[in-house]
Amino acid sequence: MLQRLLFGLITVTSLTLVGCAHSPQQLSPQPKLTTQLAPVGRGQPVVVRVVDGRPSPTLGTRGGMYPETSAISVSSADLIPKLQAQAEAAVRLLGFTPTANAMNAPTLTVTLAELKYQSPKDTMYVTEATIGATFRSDVKNGGRTYSGRYGASLDQRFGMAPNQETNTKLVSDVLSDALTRVFKDPTIGRLLSE
């Protein structure tokens, strides 16, 4: 009887501790422009490049008892083509024609400078997270240049640890917000159209 009770106690304790550990998550966010853009161009070609300037594909950890096992990451190979497609769509909406290479055409380089996910590391359960994204834009047209930084963040509270689907949506929303801010900057359209 005592042996069964001890075995049951060990089993429950093990399951509880396993519940405190989180598995790593590889997210595949779907960033989208979240607003309409007023056209300022007249179909001029613009070379559009999106690059990943992050030091690592890891955004952070989901925290919990063993944060080192709960990394959240987004691969460059998955994300950059999606951001490239959205940047080209935004350039079209601004009235320009995105092109891979055109002699003497203005260039717009959008760099994903930062993508992070922070949750408290000193608690056993994940109850909140701060997700942030920062883009840098570099515009060159002839001898004129312009650079800007655009960020978005979200503080989210949870009743229970967020699953991969929830985290994917949160990261997608923050990326979408920050990317939209890039193309709402009127200086970008103005410099590209000169």
Image: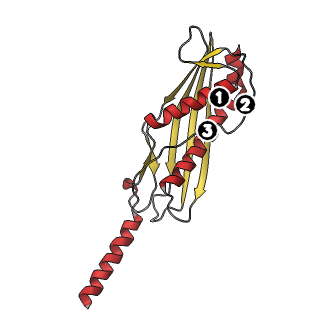
Residue under circle 2?
37
Residue 45 versus residue 3: which sits nearer the camera?
Answer: 45
On residue 90, which mark appears?
1
Q: Which residue corresponds to the image point at 46% horizontal and 42% vertical from the top-left?
A: 74
Secondary structure of the residue carrying tag 1 is: helix
- 5 versus 117 height, above or below: below
User: Mark number for residue 99?
Assistant: none
Q: Categorize mark 2 by other alpha carbons within 10 Å: few (<14), some (14-19), many (20+).
A: some
Q: Identify the residue under disc 3.
A: 32
- Residue drawn at x 65%, y 29% is 90
Pick whichever of labels 1 and 3 is earlier in the sequence. 3
Query: What amino acid does circle 3 point to?
Result: Lys
Circle 3/circle 2 CB separation < 8 Å: no
Q: Earlier in the sequence, mark 1 or mark 2?
A: 2
**Quadrant of the frame with the N terminus:** bottom left
Q: Of the residues under marks 3 and 2, which one precedes in the sequence?
A: 3
Q: Amino acid at mark 1?
A: Ala
Location of residue 41 with respect to 63 vertically, above or below: above
Rate crowding at label 3 as few (under 14), some (14 to 19) or many (20 or more) other CA atoms within 10 Å.
many
Residue 151 appearing in the image? no
Q: Quadrant of residue 40?
A: top right
Pointer 1: residues within 10 angstroms few (<14), some, or many (20+)? Answer: many
Q: Position of residue 185 (x, y in %)?
A: 69, 29
Which amino acid, by three-letter code, is at mark 2?
Leu
x and y percentages locating residue 10 in the rendered image: 30, 77
Residue 178 vertical position relative to residue 191 in the rendered view, above or below: below
Q: Is residue 94 left or right of residue 29?
A: right
Farthest residue toward the bottom? 1
